[in-house]
Image (cartoon, helix red, strand yellow):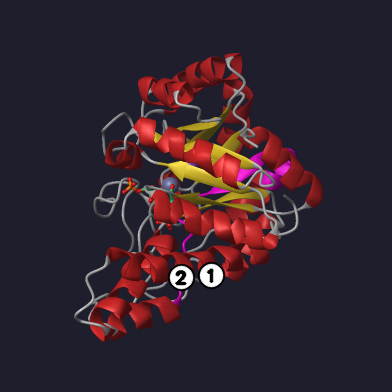
Amino acid sequence: ARITLRQLLDDAAEHGYGVPAFNINNMEQALGIMEAAAAVDAPVILQASRGARSYANDIMLAKMVEALEEMYPQIPLCLHLDHGNEEATCATALRYGFTSVMMDGSLEADAKTPASYDYNVAITRRVVDLAHWVGASVEGELGVLGSLEQGGGEQEDGHGVIGEVSHDQLLTDPDQAVDFVRATRVDALAIAMGTSHGAYKFSRKPDGDILAMHVIEEIHRRMPGVHLVMHGSSSVPQELQDMFNAFGGEMPQTWGVPVEEIVRGIRHGVRKVNIDTDCRLAMTAAFRKVASENRSEFDPRKFLKPAMEGLKTLCRERFEAFGTAGHA
Ligand code: G3H
Ligand code: 13P
Ligand code: NA
Ligand code: ZN
């Protein structure tokens, strides 16, 4: 059954668990995630980015999620827009059955520089009004994603490191967070605490200096009832890097967000955990294995089936670690 982000995260807060939000672009990703959810009885958040919507087409995504609801009637499912960059993007998602949208006003539409606070509040508030009229939820974002490690990580949109902005400006300011939630009435708040999108987050296992867990703890202390969202939460597991590289891949050594740090965040109000890179890596490592071990293989199903299995294993591990398992 389709549920809103607010319904799901309220239940997560009540029972003290977190929910991974996995990105989907196609049938195999969606099936891998749903198979994992069904195996451990977990509710799911499927999220589609603007890139996913143009890759698969809104009609295809909408009908596919309708099919998933019919195939997995026991699994509560939230369909969420990841990183909506303007009001129209959010409005069209609602029209196609998304039950939740992210209005990311931390950057101006299509810009790479941080937006003003007033811009962010105003546009997010307008999207909250629109979404709430039709019974959908809204995630807002305050602060700018980007690694606090010198030279590490990618900016918000994956296009290089942030040049001119100081580290403190990137982290979410707890005072501003309180004002932002009150002014916008968002259902969930994405915060910046030193993570970035993509595989190249950190050049060593992150410690307390580069992963600002204190920001989460402080915001949660100030607003214990607000659902927090961690973006850039892939762990980039060593074993997936090794598998990818063992079969012809060339991924330089990198570190993501350790699962135990995410679990620590969940103890401090993190309810939605965005994961895309790990899912991509789990699938493509499996493609590479098939391609290199059976060089005459050309049936795409022979690649996609193990890829789905790899994704299912990854998703299942996250459902179990975050305490989502058993809450469908
Ligand atoms: O935030 C980025 C997500 O990983 C989605 O990536 O825009 O390439 O679909 P994408
Ligand atoms: P990762 O690149 O760490 O998987 O983050 C995904 C994300 O934040 C999507 O919004
Ligand atoms: Na999102
Ligand atoms: Zn994100």
Q: Which residue is mark 2?
A: 310
Question: How far across and how far down the image is residue 296, in percent?
Answer: 19, 80
Name the image quarter holding the N terminus.
top right
> What is the CA distance from the residue labelled 2 to the residue labelled 1?
5 Å
Residue 146, labelled with which disc?
none
Question: How far across and how far down the image is residue 273, in percent?
Answer: 56, 52
Question: How far across and how far down the image is residue 261, in percent?
Answer: 59, 66
Given the image, on which type of amino acid does mark 1 rest?
A: Thr
Label 1 CA crowd tier, 10 Å (few <14, some 14–19, many 20+): some
Query: Which of 145/8 is in front?
Result: 8
Residue 313, labelled with which disc?
1
Query: Which of 9/46 is in front?
Result: 46
Which element type, helix, strand or loop, lies under badge 1? helix
Given the image, on which type of amino acid does mark 2 rest?
A: Gly
Residue occupying the point 41% across, 44% down: 144
Query: Which of 201/176 is in front?
Result: 201
Horizontally, is 196 left or right of 290 in the view? Answer: right
Residue occupying the point 45% across, 40% down: 64
Q: Classify 247 as above or below 168.
A: below
Query: Which of 73/180 is in front?
Result: 73
Q: Classify 259 as above or below 38.
A: below
Mark 2 Cβ inside 8 Å of ligand 2: no
Q: Are marks 2 and 1 in contact (CB under 8 Å)?
A: yes
Question: How far across and how far down the image is residue 13, in percent?
Answer: 75, 45
In the figure, residue 82 lies in which quadrant?
Answer: top left
Residue 233 falls within the magenta-colored stretch: yes
Q: Please state the extent of the stretch shown in magenta in the rendering.
A: 220-237
Q: Is residue 171 visible?
A: yes
